[in-house]
Amino acid sequence: MKQDELKKMAAEAAVEFVEDHMIVGLGTGSTVMHMVTALAKRVKAENLTIVGVSTSRRTEIQAEDLGITMKSIDDVDHVDLTIDGADEVDKSFNGIKGGGAAHAFEKIVATSSTRNLWIVDESKLVDRIGRFPLPIEVIPYGSKKVFARLASENLNPQFRKDDQGNDVITDSGNFIIDLHLGVVEHPHLLANWLSEQVGVLEHGLFLDTVDTVIVGTQDGPKILH
Ligand code: 5RP
Protein backbone atom coordinates (compact mmCIF):
# COMPACT_ATOMS: atom_id res chain seq x y z
CA MET A 1 0.00 0.00 0.00
CA LYS A 2 1.16 3.52 -0.77
CA GLN A 3 1.75 6.16 1.90
CA ASP A 4 -1.46 8.03 1.14
CA GLU A 5 -3.51 4.83 1.53
CA LEU A 6 -1.90 4.27 4.94
CA LYS A 7 -2.79 7.85 5.92
CA LYS A 8 -6.39 7.21 4.83
CA MET A 9 -6.48 3.98 6.82
CA ALA A 10 -5.40 5.76 10.02
CA ALA A 11 -7.81 8.63 9.32
CA GLU A 12 -10.80 6.33 8.85
CA ALA A 13 -10.00 4.40 12.02
CA ALA A 14 -9.80 7.66 13.98
CA VAL A 15 -13.31 8.88 13.21
CA GLU A 16 -14.68 5.91 15.15
CA PHE A 17 -13.44 7.73 18.28
CA VAL A 18 -15.88 10.59 17.66
CA GLU A 19 -19.12 10.40 19.66
CA ASP A 20 -22.40 12.22 19.25
CA HIS A 21 -22.44 15.78 20.71
CA MET A 22 -18.66 16.04 20.85
CA ILE A 23 -16.72 19.21 20.13
CA VAL A 24 -13.95 17.92 17.87
CA GLY A 25 -10.67 19.64 17.09
CA LEU A 26 -9.73 19.15 13.45
CA GLY A 27 -6.02 19.29 12.67
CA THR A 28 -4.35 20.14 9.39
CA GLY A 29 -2.63 18.23 6.60
CA SER A 30 -3.20 15.50 4.06
CA THR A 31 -4.01 12.82 6.67
CA VAL A 32 -6.49 15.13 8.34
CA MET A 33 -8.13 15.80 4.97
CA HIS A 34 -8.96 12.09 4.75
CA MET A 35 -10.24 12.22 8.32
CA VAL A 36 -12.50 15.22 7.68
CA THR A 37 -13.97 13.47 4.63
CA ALA A 38 -14.64 10.31 6.64
CA LEU A 39 -16.01 12.29 9.57
CA ALA A 40 -18.45 14.22 7.37
CA LYS A 41 -19.69 10.91 5.95
CA ARG A 42 -20.27 9.53 9.46
CA VAL A 43 -22.01 12.69 10.61
CA LYS A 44 -24.43 12.45 7.67
CA ALA A 45 -24.96 8.69 7.82
CA GLU A 46 -25.57 8.61 11.59
CA ASN A 47 -27.13 12.06 11.88
CA LEU A 48 -24.57 13.05 14.54
CA THR A 49 -24.59 16.47 16.17
CA ILE A 50 -20.97 17.48 16.44
CA VAL A 51 -19.13 20.79 16.32
CA GLY A 52 -15.73 21.09 14.65
CA VAL A 53 -12.98 23.45 15.73
CA SER A 54 -10.47 24.09 13.01
CA THR A 55 -6.69 24.58 13.21
CA SER A 56 -6.30 26.22 9.81
CA ARG A 57 -8.22 28.03 7.11
CA ARG A 58 -7.72 25.00 4.81
CA THR A 59 -9.37 22.58 7.20
CA GLU A 60 -12.14 25.02 7.99
CA ILE A 61 -13.04 25.42 4.31
CA GLN A 62 -13.04 21.65 3.72
CA ALA A 63 -15.12 20.91 6.82
CA GLU A 64 -17.67 23.63 6.07
CA ASP A 65 -17.95 22.50 2.45
CA LEU A 66 -18.73 18.99 3.68
CA GLY A 67 -21.44 20.27 6.02
CA ILE A 68 -19.69 20.02 9.39
CA THR A 69 -20.80 22.75 11.82
CA MET A 70 -17.72 24.76 12.72
CA LYS A 71 -16.93 27.12 15.60
CA SER A 72 -13.86 29.14 16.45
CA ILE A 73 -11.71 27.97 19.37
CA ASP A 74 -12.73 31.11 21.26
CA ASP A 75 -16.42 30.32 20.85
CA VAL A 76 -16.29 26.93 22.60
CA ASP A 77 -15.64 26.37 26.29
CA HIS A 78 -13.82 23.08 25.72
CA VAL A 79 -12.80 20.59 23.04
CA ASP A 80 -13.53 16.90 23.73
CA LEU A 81 -11.20 15.27 21.22
CA THR A 82 -8.69 16.60 18.71
CA ILE A 83 -7.58 14.50 15.77
CA ASP A 84 -4.45 15.71 14.02
CA GLY A 85 -1.55 14.48 11.93
CA ALA A 86 2.16 14.65 12.77
CA ASP A 87 5.46 14.76 10.96
CA GLU A 88 7.36 12.52 13.38
CA VAL A 89 6.43 10.61 16.54
CA ASP A 90 8.71 8.69 18.90
CA LYS A 91 7.81 5.86 21.26
CA SER A 92 7.04 8.29 24.10
CA PHE A 93 4.70 10.20 21.77
CA ASN A 94 7.04 13.18 21.53
CA GLY A 95 6.33 14.66 18.15
CA ILE A 96 7.23 17.24 15.55
CA LYS A 97 4.41 19.08 13.83
CA GLY A 98 4.16 22.07 11.54
CA GLY A 99 5.03 20.59 8.16
CA GLY A 100 1.84 22.34 7.04
CA ALA A 101 2.79 25.58 8.87
CA ALA A 102 -0.24 25.26 11.17
CA HIS A 103 1.41 24.13 14.41
CA ALA A 104 0.64 27.30 16.40
CA PHE A 105 -3.12 26.98 15.90
CA GLU A 106 -2.80 23.20 16.27
CA LYS A 107 -1.09 23.58 19.63
CA ILE A 108 -3.72 26.04 20.87
CA VAL A 109 -6.49 23.58 20.00
CA ALA A 110 -4.53 20.58 21.33
CA THR A 111 -3.89 22.19 24.69
CA SER A 112 -7.60 23.05 24.98
CA SER A 113 -8.61 19.48 24.23
CA THR A 114 -9.44 16.77 26.76
CA ARG A 115 -8.08 14.07 24.46
CA ASN A 116 -5.59 14.24 21.61
CA LEU A 117 -5.25 11.59 18.96
CA TRP A 118 -2.70 11.59 16.13
CA ILE A 119 -3.12 9.84 12.83
CA VAL A 120 0.02 8.89 10.92
CA ASP A 121 1.30 6.43 8.37
CA GLU A 122 4.03 4.10 9.61
CA SER A 123 6.85 6.17 8.06
CA LYS A 124 6.25 8.84 10.73
CA LEU A 125 7.24 6.55 13.62
CA VAL A 126 10.86 7.18 14.61
CA ASP A 127 13.23 6.17 17.39
CA ARG A 128 14.29 9.78 17.93
CA ILE A 129 12.67 12.91 16.56
CA GLY A 130 14.59 15.55 14.62
CA ARG A 131 15.25 14.25 11.13
CA PHE A 132 12.16 16.17 10.03
CA PRO A 133 13.07 19.88 10.17
CA LEU A 134 11.58 21.44 13.30
CA PRO A 135 9.27 24.35 12.36
CA ILE A 136 9.31 27.60 14.32
CA GLU A 137 6.67 30.26 13.67
CA VAL A 138 8.17 33.73 14.04
CA ILE A 139 6.58 37.14 13.76
CA PRO A 140 7.96 39.03 10.73
CA TYR A 141 9.24 41.99 12.78
CA GLY A 142 12.78 41.18 13.81
CA SER A 143 12.65 37.70 12.28
CA LYS A 144 16.21 38.05 10.94
CA LYS A 145 17.35 38.70 14.49
CA VAL A 146 15.59 35.54 15.66
CA PHE A 147 17.17 33.69 12.74
CA ALA A 148 20.64 34.92 13.75
CA ARG A 149 20.08 33.79 17.35
CA LEU A 150 19.02 30.33 16.17
CA ALA A 151 22.06 30.15 13.86
CA SER A 152 24.40 31.19 16.68
CA GLU A 153 23.09 28.21 18.70
CA ASN A 154 23.99 25.92 15.75
CA LEU A 155 20.33 25.06 15.17
CA ASN A 156 20.72 25.25 11.36
CA PRO A 157 17.76 27.53 10.64
CA GLN A 158 16.26 28.08 7.23
CA PHE A 159 13.36 30.36 6.30
CA ARG A 160 10.66 28.24 4.69
CA LYS A 161 9.94 29.21 1.08
CA ASP A 162 7.17 28.13 -1.27
CA ASP A 163 7.71 26.69 -4.77
CA GLN A 164 8.12 30.23 -6.17
CA GLY A 165 10.79 31.08 -3.62
CA ASN A 166 8.51 33.35 -1.57
CA ASP A 167 8.33 33.23 2.22
CA VAL A 168 5.68 30.84 3.47
CA ILE A 169 3.13 32.89 5.42
CA THR A 170 1.04 31.26 8.13
CA ASP A 171 -2.68 31.83 8.72
CA SER A 172 -1.70 34.47 11.28
CA GLY A 173 0.62 36.28 8.89
CA ASN A 174 3.92 35.01 10.26
CA PHE A 175 7.02 33.33 8.83
CA ILE A 176 8.27 29.79 9.37
CA ILE A 177 11.90 29.02 10.17
CA ASP A 178 12.79 25.32 9.95
CA LEU A 179 15.57 23.97 12.15
CA HIS A 180 17.60 21.23 10.48
CA LEU A 181 18.74 19.30 13.52
CA GLY A 182 19.13 15.68 12.47
CA VAL A 183 18.18 14.61 15.96
CA VAL A 184 16.64 16.42 18.92
CA GLU A 185 18.82 15.28 21.81
CA HIS A 186 16.80 16.87 24.63
CA PRO A 187 13.27 17.69 23.45
CA HIS A 188 12.06 19.28 26.70
CA LEU A 189 15.16 21.47 27.10
CA LEU A 190 14.93 22.63 23.50
CA ALA A 191 11.18 23.28 23.79
CA ASN A 192 11.71 25.39 26.90
CA TRP A 193 14.56 27.35 25.32
CA LEU A 194 12.57 28.05 22.15
CA SER A 195 9.53 29.15 24.17
CA GLU A 196 11.69 31.77 25.90
CA GLN A 197 12.93 33.37 22.68
CA VAL A 198 11.34 36.73 21.97
CA GLY A 199 9.85 36.83 18.47
CA VAL A 200 9.11 33.09 18.46
CA LEU A 201 5.36 32.65 18.38
CA GLU A 202 5.41 28.83 18.65
CA HIS A 203 7.63 25.85 17.92
CA GLY A 204 6.61 22.51 16.48
CA LEU A 205 7.70 20.31 19.38
CA PHE A 206 4.59 18.63 20.80
CA LEU A 207 5.60 16.88 24.01
CA ASP A 208 3.28 15.10 26.44
CA THR A 209 0.34 16.12 24.27
CA VAL A 210 -1.27 13.00 22.80
CA ASP A 211 -2.77 9.98 24.50
CA THR A 212 -3.39 7.88 21.38
CA VAL A 213 -1.66 7.44 18.03
CA ILE A 214 -3.32 5.55 15.19
CA VAL A 215 -0.79 4.25 12.69
CA GLY A 216 -1.67 3.11 9.19
CA THR A 217 0.51 0.04 8.53
CA GLN A 218 0.75 -2.61 5.83
CA ASP A 219 -0.92 -4.96 8.36
CA GLY A 220 -3.85 -2.63 9.06
CA PRO A 221 -4.44 0.22 11.51
CA LYS A 222 -2.57 -0.01 14.82
CA ILE A 223 -3.84 1.88 17.86
CA LEU A 224 -1.07 2.87 20.26
CA HIS A 225 -1.74 4.21 23.77
C1 5RP B 1 0.50 20.72 9.85
C2 5RP B 1 0.92 19.47 10.54
C3 5RP B 1 0.51 18.19 9.92
O1 5RP B 1 -0.28 17.50 10.81
C4 5RP B 1 1.75 17.39 9.60
O2 5RP B 1 2.57 18.16 8.76
C5 5RP B 1 1.39 16.07 8.91
O3 5RP B 1 0.90 16.32 7.64
P1 5RP B 1 0.45 15.19 6.65
O4 5RP B 1 -0.74 14.53 7.25
O5 5RP B 1 0.15 15.91 5.36
O6 5RP B 1 1.61 14.21 6.48
O7 5RP B 1 1.55 19.48 11.57
O8 5RP B 1 1.05 21.86 10.45
Image (spheres, rainbow, N blue to C red):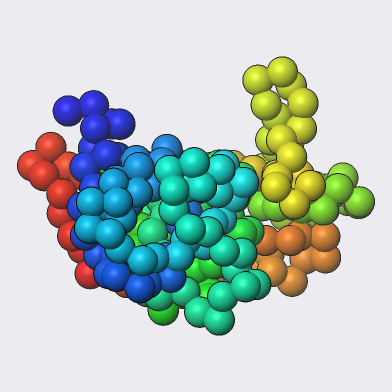
Residue 21 shows in the view: yes
Q: Nearer the viewer, residue 133 or 184?
A: 133
Query: Quarter of the image holding residue 203?
Result: bottom right
Quarter in which the C terminus is drawn: bottom left
Query: Vertical placement of 105 versus 57: above or below?
Result: below
Q: Is residue 152 visible?
A: no
Image quadrant containing the N terminus? top left
Residue occupying the far left of the picture: 219
145 lies left or right of 31: right
Extreme-right residue of the structure: 141
Give the residue displayed 63% in from the left and 59% down from the top: 104
Q: Is residue 136 left or right of residue 97?
A: right
Q: Is residue 21 left or right of residue 183?
A: left
Residue 220: x %, y % from top left: 11, 44
Q: Residue at x 38, y 59 (%)?
A: 83
Question: Of all residues shown, which one is farthest toward the front?
Answer: 47
Closer-to-camera residue (212/50): 50
Q: Return the x and y of residue 135 as percentages of the image width and height.
A: 61, 48
Residue 165 lies in quadrant:
top right
